[in-house]
Every structure is written in structure tokens, then in C-alpha cells.
């Protein structure tokens, strides 16, 4: 459409599309097939994998890692210490904190805590992830939930504070009592220590 800002290429990043309104700082790595949309800011020492999408008004970095195939929706800030493994979905306006007890008049950058989001996890719109915790593989965080503890693989978490209300399959379907994915037929079982695992 005439007059509309367009995607541009950057000689630093082969096969990457970057909107002309976005800023990508020096000392950044971005994999091919990734799209960086309107008003995104990627700060130094950030690594972004292949085939990712960073939606409008996303901020990533410094020292953030985003694995291949991640989708970061609009208005998400990924702060120092956040690490996303492959295939993570971050819904619009979800929040990652970096310090547990911030004060405007105190510099606590030395207290930033690592937050790890494992492969295939989904975080709903407006959810808050309190720093220093790990979100397990293929877990599903409901919209608006506040996660203040580690999350097991495949857990469906909801509420404030978030608690496990069920299990989700690798494919993102809620599991019933039989623990069989209604979409793929994949089977799961609960372990004695309260985790869920796939049955080969």
C-alpha cells in the first residue's frame, strides 16, 4: 500500500525482515526467517533464533536468548536474564519481571534473576511471570495468571497466584482423565511425584 512503512533487510542478518521503525542494536544475533515488526527494540548481547516473530512494540534485551520458532506478541518486554527455548509463545502484553522487590530509588541490577521458559511453553495475554522461576516444557499459562513458582512440564496454570488446574498435551489440547490428547491420540501418565510424562 502506497505510503505504508515496509520491511527492510539488514546486511548484518541474512534472511531476516526488519520493519523500518524497529531498532536493532550492535552485538545482536538473529537467525534467518525471523521477522521484526513495528517499533521493536532489540538491545545488545541478545540472541534470537531462526523463524521467530517479534510483534509490535516488543523489547528484547540486553542479554536475552530467544530460541528458534518463538512467537512474541505485541507489547512484551523480555528483560536481562530471560531465556526462551524453542517454540515458545508469549501472548500480548504478558509481563516478565526481573527483580522481586524493586524500588525506584534503589539500583538492583545486580539482583536480576534468571527466568527460563522451556520448549513449547505458551504464556497467555496479560500473564505475569515472576522472575527466578522455570516454566516447564509445553506448559500453558492462562491469560491473566501470575506465576510465582516453578511450573511442571505440560501443566495448565491459572489464577492469582497461578495454580495447576489440569494438564495440556504437547499439541496444546487440555487432557481429560484418560490423559489422551483428543487431537493426536498421544498418551500421557502421571508420575508418583506429581509430574506428567509422555508414554512412548
Image (cartoon, grey):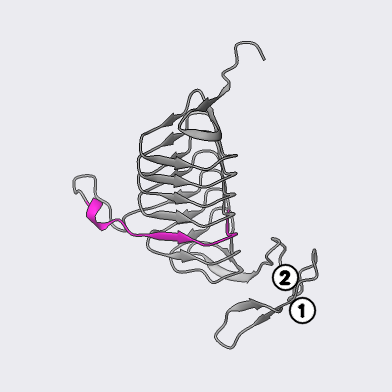
Residue identifier under label 1: 178
What is the total number of numbered labels drawn onto the structure image?
2
Q: Is 96 above or below relative to 18?
A: below
Does 65 lie within the magenta span?
no
Residue, x 27% and y 52% (percent of image)?
102
Q: Is 146 in front, or is 31?
A: 31
Q: Quadrant of residue 180?
A: bottom right
Tell me if residue 113 comes above or below residue 180 in the rendering. above
Name the residue tied to disc 2. 175
Q: Quadrant of the C terminus?
A: bottom right
User: Which residue appears at 55% of the width and 34% of the height?
Assistant: 16
Position in image of residue 86 (x %, y %): 56, 56
Q: Which mark is residue 117?
A: none
For residue 168, which quarter of the picture?
bottom right
| Left or right of residue 77, residue 86 in this image | right
User: How crowded is the residue under tag 2: few (<14 C-alpha within 10 Å), some, or many (20+)?
Assistant: some
Amino acid at each position: 500500500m502506497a505510503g505504508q512503512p515496509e520491511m527492510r533487510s539488514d546486511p548484518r542478518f541474512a534472511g531476516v525482515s526488519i520493519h523500518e521503525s524497529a531498532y536493532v542494536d550492535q552485538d545482536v544475533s538473529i537467525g534467518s526467517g525471523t521477522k521484526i515488526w513495528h517499533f521493536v527494540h532489540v538491545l545488545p548481547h541478545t540472541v534470537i533464533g531462526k523463524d521467530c516473530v517479534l510483534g509490535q512494540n516488543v523489547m528484547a534485551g540486553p542479554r536475552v536468548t530467544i530460541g528458534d520458532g518463538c512467537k512474541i506478541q505485541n507489547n512484551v518486554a523480555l528483560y536481562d536474564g530471560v531465556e526462551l527455548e524453542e517454540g515458545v509463545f508469549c501472548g500480548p502484553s504478558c509481563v516478565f519481571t526481573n527483580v522481586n522487590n524493586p524500588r525506584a530509588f534503589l539500583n538492583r541490577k545486580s539482583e536480576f534473576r534468571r527466568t527460563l521458559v522451556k520448549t513449547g511453553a505458551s504464556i497467555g495475554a496479560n500473564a505475569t511471570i515472576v522472575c527466578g522461576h522455570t516454566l516447564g516444557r509445553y506448559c500453558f499459562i492462562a491469560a491473566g495468571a501470575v506465576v510465582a513458582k516453578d511450573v511442571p512440564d505440560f501443566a495448565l496454570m491459572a489464577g492469582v497466584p497461578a495454580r495447576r488446574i489440569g494438564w495440556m498435551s504437547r499439541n496444546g489440547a487440555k487432557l481429560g482423565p484418560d490423559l489422551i490428547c483428543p487431537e493426536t491420540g498421544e498418551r500421557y501418565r502421571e508420575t508418583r511425584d506429581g509430574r506428567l510424562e509422555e508414554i512412548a
